[in-house]
Image (cartoon, coloured by chain):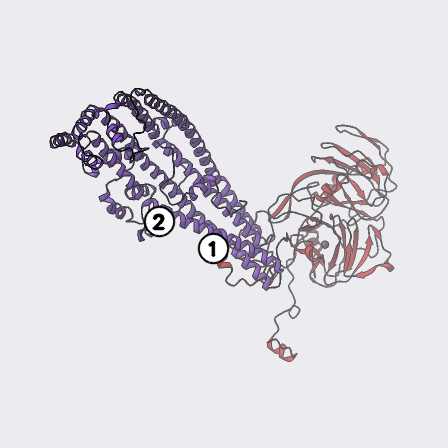
Chain colours: A red, B purple
């Protein structure tokens, strides 16, 4: 991923508003567009906006050419890693799942080249945008689909600001399902008040990848078993690192196939500041701890990070915080395995009853599970025990005194060190006695 | 005169008797040697060596297929009875070289008549019989050879039947073990269901379903055990064992994999034809009938001189419908009808000989095809299907370990693996039965079971289904 400096270096003459003709060579037709004249200078990172942070992801680099910001998306199949031990063949843009974030500024003219390296035709739909109908990207309705091997171009002016998305709109079920989605952030010309210090973008998605399979099943309609933010399951999503006192925005987009996700933040009350790109007037912003992000919707939440700690941020649907949960697994809770396992081993060597105490059952570590599967993944946090959370979850690490450099480098400050007397412990006998708790 | 005639007969008899009656073991040597040569193993037909044979063979408790064959040949009581045919036929050869005993005739004559013309009659008979001795002897010899061939055939049949029974039992014991494992697997499924019911997690219906599956599998095990017991008794019957010795032997637990034929496929038919005892016996019969065509013509030429006259005359009431009814006045019958009949019998035998040769070729081809396809099939089951099922079980178990599926699916996968193993055993057993059939043909016999107590095992094996109660594997 290029740095901002490289982007700027790659950007040619800034603000040269010259009308010119651009011919794009392609296998079939030739697209011919006339560059418009932007009303204002094209927005530049740090100058006109504070770039978003994409945990475990990236933004699309751009160059400035012929009066527009030029982006290039390459749709193709590649192997994506959801977590150590689980990767699959996905379809995505620029080798990323879920796609890289496009950032621009209200009033910019964007020219977006789309190269189709998929085996199937495709289009890109700009989700939520006010644009010419012919740029809307619905295959067969507003354009011919882009054939495999061709590069097509979309160009339009950004007349809105807020959190938006883009995704394939050709065979949407398959192509979105396999990962052809991304977020599109349009920063306002004028910064909002109060300005945010840390602006994160998270794209929600859901997949069906059978334990041991190597490709998500886009035909799945209800039984999804891999739930991701920016294409990662917990705890393999990079943490959202914040210095105590900073103002934080989290932009959440949901292009899951079939599920809305009630996203819940621990330890804070946040303001829901935007819905589908629309900024909510300050006096109408509601304080919440959970915001429901429907399919095809975006939400922005903001809060002042005044409480240090490792705060979980996750979908509150319990099945969405599991990794490759087997829904065909019978209910084994309460199963009395006394005298059972040894005998079954005479027929099935190595047999061990699972799930009698729940789905986070301890395994002896010798039990073979399918390659490329993570149902038994046992990541550790700052404790002896593994983290009892997976799937669509992340952690916001709020720490005192983090330097701007450390934040810019995206350093992980490690697990939170709880000050004495501020974490749950086994109750002492004195405490029990003092408070009259009979726990015998 | 009477005394003189008797003396003459006795002298003649004594002269002929000198060449006969060796001890039983030696008398059976030719058959034994022939059987050994064909079977390729040492066998004993000596009744006095029976106990020793049992003790030697059963010393280590494990019976090999060859040992089982040797033991059966030494000890099978039906075969012992057949072996007596050898001695009987040998005696008949001897008898054919003797003059009929006139003393016996005289005694009959005394009872039936006043015995006035006894002497002439006796003499007349003697003269004709003496004339016919070489031919009678020749017929008896041909018959003896036929009996020899029949007894050899019986030994070979017994060997094949023992081999069939042996492989069938071996397979059945393996099947019993597989049924036992399958029964265990379904029991654990039932047990798991009960425990889950106990925990309050599943409904009664689920428990009953698992229970039914278990009980049905258990029933199949019980049938398999019963069949194994029956087959063991069949083996004991073939081995000629009826006492406690019957529990002293066992067979190795695994059927061997198919082995290559020692002859090239294109030689199978000709080898079967060349080896066929049936065909050789048929050949002897054709030859014997050819000779009796001659003989009958001679007898027909001299009907008035035949022994029947006296009997006919003296015993109108007592012998009506007896063996001599065909006789009538020579004015009409000079033997042409009898000759015609004999010639037809000869032609018939020759046609049967040809038919047998064709049938042998057909059987050889069929047995070869069965043997090689079952061989291929059993190899495929062992090398492909069973390992595949085993991998499926492993993968199912991995999915279980990953908590994707439950214990019931794991047990079910294991059960299917056992089913595949069962098919493999059954296919291998079918191969050995087919192979035995082919080997039997190459030994010179169209196999036929006639020594065991029951043929259900073989029939079931040939039908390719070891267990009628086990559907859908
Ligand atoms: Cu959710």
Residue B343 visible, this angle: yes
* Ligand 1 within 8 angstroms of badge 2 C-beta: no
Label 1 CA crowd tier, 10 Å (few <14, some 14–19, many 20+): few
Quadrant assignment for ligand 1: bottom right
- Image quarter of residue B406: bottom right
User: How far apart in space, not on screen, are marks 2 and 1 (Cα)?
Assistant: 25 Å
Q: Is residue A46 above or below residue B9?
A: below
- Give the numbered dot on residue B251: none
Q: Residue B251 in the image: state x and y as whole percent.
A: 36, 47
Q: Are marks 2 and 1 on the same chain?
A: no
Q: In terms of depth relative to the viewer, which is nearer, A250 or B212?
A: B212
- Label 2 lies in what chain? B
Circle 1 is placed at which residue position?
A346
Q: Is residue A73 above or below residue A365?
A: above
In the image: residue A127, left or right of residue B273: right
Q: In terms of depth relative to the viewer, which is nearer, B282 or B467?
A: B282
Residue B141 visible, this angle: no
Q: Residue furthest right?
A: A39
Q: Is residue B129 above or below residue A136?
A: above
Q: Residue B133 in the image: state x and y as whole percent.
A: 21, 26
Judging from the image, what secondary structure is the residue with disc 1 in? loop
- Label 1 lies in what chain? A
Q: Quadrant of the C terminus of chain A?
A: bottom right
In the image: residue B227, left or right of residue A111: left
In the image: residue A155, left or right of residue A427: right
Circle 2 is placed at which residue position?
B250
Q: Quadrant of the N terminus of chain A?
A: top right
Q: In terms of depth relative to the viewer, which is nearer, A343 or B81?
A: B81
């Amino acid at each position: 991923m290029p740095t901002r400096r490289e982007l700027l270096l790659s950007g040619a003459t800034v603000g040269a508003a010259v009308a010119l003709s651009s011919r794009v060579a392609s296998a079939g037709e030739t697209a011919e567009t006339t560059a418009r004249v932007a009303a204002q200078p094209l927005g530049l990172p740090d100058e006109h906006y504070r770039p978003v942070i994409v945990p475990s992801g990236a933004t699309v680099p751009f160059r400035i050419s012929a009066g527009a910001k030029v982006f290039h998306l390459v749709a193709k199949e590649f192997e994506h890693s959801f977590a150590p031990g689980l990767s699959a063949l996905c379809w995505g843009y620029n080798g990323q799942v879920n796609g890289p974030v496009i950032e621009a500024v209200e009033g910019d003219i964007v020219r977006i080249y789309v190269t189709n390296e998929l085996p199937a035709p495709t289009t890109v739909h700009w989700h939520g945008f006010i644009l010419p109908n012919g740029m809307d990207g619905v295959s067969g309705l507003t354009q011919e689909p882009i054939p495999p091997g061709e590069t097509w171009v979309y160009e339009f002016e950004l007349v809105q600001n807020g959190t938006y998305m883009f995704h394939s709109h050709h065979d949407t079920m398959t192509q979105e399902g396999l990962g052809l989605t991304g977020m599109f952030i349009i920063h306002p010309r004028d910064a909002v008040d109060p300005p945010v210090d840390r602006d994160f973008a998270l794209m929600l998605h859901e997949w069906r990848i059978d334990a041991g399979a190597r490709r998500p099943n886009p035909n799945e309609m209800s039984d999804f078993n891999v739930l991701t933010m920016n294409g990662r399951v917990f705890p393999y999503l990079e943490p959202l690192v914040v210095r105590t006192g900073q103002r934080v925005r989290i932009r959440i987009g949901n292009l899951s196939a079939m599920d809305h996700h009630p996203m819940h933040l621990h330890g804070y009350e946040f303001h829901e500041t935007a819905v589908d790109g629309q900024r909510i007037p300050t006096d109408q912003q509601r304080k919440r701890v959970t915001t429901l992000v429907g399919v095809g919707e975006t939400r922005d939440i903001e809060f002042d990070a005044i409480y240090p700690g490792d705060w979980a941020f996750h979908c509150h649907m319990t099945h969405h915080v599991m990794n490759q949960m087997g829904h065909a697994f019978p209910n084994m809770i309460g199963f009395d395995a006394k005298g059972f396992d040894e005998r079954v081993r005479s027929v099935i060597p190595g047999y061990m009853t699972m799930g009698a105490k729940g789905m986070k059952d301890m395994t002896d570590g010798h039990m073979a599970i399918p390659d490329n599967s993570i149902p038994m993944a046992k990541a550790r946090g700052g404790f002896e025990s593994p983290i009892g959370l997976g799937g669509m979850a992340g952690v916001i690490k709020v720490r005192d005194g983090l330097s701007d450099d450390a934040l810019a480098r995206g350093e992980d400050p490690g697990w939170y060190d709880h000050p004495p007397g501020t974490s749950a412990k086994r109750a002492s006998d004195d405490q029990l006695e003092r408070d009259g708790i009979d726990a015998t | 005169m009477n005394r003189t005639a008797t003396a003459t007969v006795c002298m003649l008899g004594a002269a002929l008797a000198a060449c006969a009656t060796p001890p039983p073991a030696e008398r059976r040597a030719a058959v034994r040697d022939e059987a050994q040569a064909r079977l390729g193993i040492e066998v004993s037909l000596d009744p006095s060596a029976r106990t020793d044979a049992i003790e030697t063979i059963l010393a280590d408790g494990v019976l090999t297929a060859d040992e089982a064959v040797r033991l059966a040949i030494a000890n099978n009581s039906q075969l012992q009875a057949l072996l007596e045919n050898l001695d009987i036929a040998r005696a008949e050869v001897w008898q054919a070289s003797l003059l009929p005993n006139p003393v016996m005739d005289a005694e009959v004559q005394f009872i039936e008549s006043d015995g006035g013309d006894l002497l002439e009659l006796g003499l007349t008979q003697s003269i004709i019989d003496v004339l016919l001795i070489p031919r009678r002897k020749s017929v008896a010899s041909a018959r003896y050879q036929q009996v020899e061939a029949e007894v050899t055939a019986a030994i070979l049949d017994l060997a094949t039947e023992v081999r069939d029974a042996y492989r069938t039992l071996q397979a059945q014991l393996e099947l019993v073990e597989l049924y036992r494992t399958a029964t265990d697997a379904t029991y654990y499924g039932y047990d798991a269901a009960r425990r889950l019911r106990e925990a309050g997690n599943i409904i009664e219906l689920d428990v009953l379903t698992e229970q039914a599956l278990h009980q049905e599998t258990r029933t199949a095990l019980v049938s398999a055990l019963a069949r194994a017991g029956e087959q063991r008794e069949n083996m004991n019957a073939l081995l000629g064992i009826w006492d406690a010795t019957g529990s002293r032997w066992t067979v190795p637990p695994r059927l061997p994999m198919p082995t290559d034929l020692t002859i090239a496929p294109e030689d199978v038919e000709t080898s079967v034809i060349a080896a066929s005892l049936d065909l050789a016996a048929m050949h002897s019969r054709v030859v014997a009938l050819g000779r009796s065509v001659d003989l009958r013509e001679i007898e027909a030429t001299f009907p008035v001189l035949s022994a029947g006259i006296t009997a006919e005359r003296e015993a109108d009431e007592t012998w009506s419908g007896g063996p001599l009814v065909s006789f009538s006045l020579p004015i009409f019958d000079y033997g042409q009808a009898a000759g015609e009949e004999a010639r037809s019998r000869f032609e018939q035998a020759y046609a049967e000989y040809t038919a047998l040769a064709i049938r042998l070729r057909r059987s050889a081809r069929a047995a070869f095809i069965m043997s090689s396809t079952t061989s291929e099939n059993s190899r495929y089951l062992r090398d492909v299907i069973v390992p595949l099922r085993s991998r499926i079980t492993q993968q199912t178990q991995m999915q279980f370990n990953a908590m994707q599926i439950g214990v019931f699916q794991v047990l079910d996968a294991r059960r299917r693996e056992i089913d595949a193993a069962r098919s493999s055993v059954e296919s291998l057993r079918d191969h050995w039965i087919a192979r035995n059939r082919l080997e039997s043909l190459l030994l010179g016999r169209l196999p036929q079971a006639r020594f065991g107590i029951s043929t259900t095992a073989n029939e079931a094996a040939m039908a390719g289904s070891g267990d009628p109660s086990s559907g859908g594997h």
